[in-house]
Image (cartoon, rainbow, N blue to C red):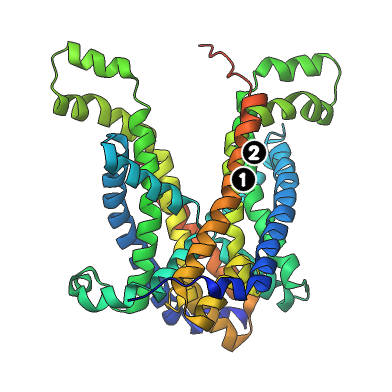
Amino acid sequence: MTGNVIINNLPFLMHGLFVTLKVAFISIILSMLFGTVLGVARFAKIPLLSLVVGLFIDITRAVPLILYIIFIHFSISPYLYEHACFVNYLGINCLEMFSAVLAIVIFTSAYIAEIIRSGLASIENEQILAAKALALNEYQTMEYIILPQAITRMKPSLCAQFITLVKDTSLASAIGLIEFTRAAEIVYETSLHEFQILSFVALVYITINFLIHKILVNS
Amino acid sequence: MYGLDFSILSENYKTIFAGISMTVLVSSIASVIAFVLGTFFVYFRISPNESVQKIMDFLVSCIRNMPLLILIYLFYKGLPSIGIVFSAFVCGVLALGIYTAAYISDALLSGIYAVPKEHFQASKALGLTRIQSFLYIIYPQALRHCVFILGSQFMNLIKNSSLVSFIAVADTFYVVYKGMADSYRIYEYFILAVVVYGSLTLFVLLVTNILQKNYKLPAAEVRV
């Protein structure tokens, strides 16, 4: 009986899951990109730029994501979506998805920037001096000395951040994007098997995050 | 040209103030629940019985890997369908507390690992029971090792408390969202929310810094 509810609505739920994974995937790629730029900008101590970037990162980290999603959906996103046709090539095909991706990318890149910055800062100064003594130039120091160590140290935090991002996509249900959580909501509102469906949804999220953890930790 | 007009906030100061106090109330009760539950979790996670350890580890990683929104819905909409009914406020606080407890138990676990092994053995040699040695010897030191991580978890808790508005607990985010929808004064309400959440997290950060300065233990020396 209860199994039937899930099986009967499986195509709909799977469509929601697909949207969730799509949003998560696009957001991970874009926020890695922007996060690295912001993190390096803050790390490099360029006079005005680092200050502005630091302020942006600190404010973003102090505010809940849901507020960002609502704010961006209500304010700038409709205007941007009309004029930014290129987002269609990313697979974003509705305004809600655009707002969700935009908000999650802005939010997560602030966190990733901090991870990148702390990873770069964790490399001891002696190593840079030693690299200089070995007559490596700045680029070589970055490529052979700093980055390999920094990436190893950043990996666990980045993995945790990606898992947080996948969990955060559930907040996009607030603006009506039919992703996994919203799809499940629609199903249990019509079928009244809340507990079973919500447990199923939780189980799927847990499985996805376990998989991400396994893939990233073992890579 | 859109001009900022903050009179909308002063007109609704009563609702806004009620929302802020609800956020403070929810997050303070949830912090207490999270702290106590997290301590329980970590006590069982270092239990000598390996199966208890495995079960608790699994439970904690399950809670950490599911979205908070789903946990809140499970309490608010899932439990009534199997006959357990709580009010929205209780559901929100409980879900928030349990969710953060998983994170706090991880933070405490890292603190416990920082306590040298000899302390366990010494407390055993003094004839303390397991609970006594945990409460009087290990736990106080572990707390002092992980002040900053605990602080950041409490900051996360304050931010996550905005999700209780999904089950109609009228906290700051709920008031802001309603204000945005009713008056369409988006920017004013957004700035209000940034200021409120920013100052709440800043307050926790300052307290954490003071505690860190006064109570942080130096890291144990590394022995190879």
> Looking at the image, which residue is at 56% across and 69% down?
A200
Label 2 sits on what residue type? Val
Mark 2 element type? helix
Mark 1 belongs to chain: B
Residue B140 position (above or below residue B17): above
Q: Residue under label 1, please give it.
A: B203
> Looking at the image, which residue is at 35% across and 37% down?
A117
* CB atoms of marks 1 and 2 within 8 Å: yes
Mark 1 element type? helix
Location of residue B113 (image quadrant): top right
Q: Position of residue A52 (x, y in %)?
A: 33, 46
Residue A122 position (above or below residue B83): above
Q: Dot 1, how many residues are within 10 Å of its Cα: few (below 14), some (14-19), or many (20+)?
A: few
* Along the line of sight, the residue nearer the viewer: A174 or B134: A174
The quadrant of the image that shows the N terminus of chain B is: bottom left
Label 1 sits on what residue type? Phe
In the shown orientation, is residue B50 left or right of residue B202? Answer: right
Location of residue B49 (image quadrant): top right
Q: Position of residue A1 (x, y in %)?
A: 62, 83
- Residue B30 in view of the camera: yes
Q: Residue under label 2, please give it.
A: B207
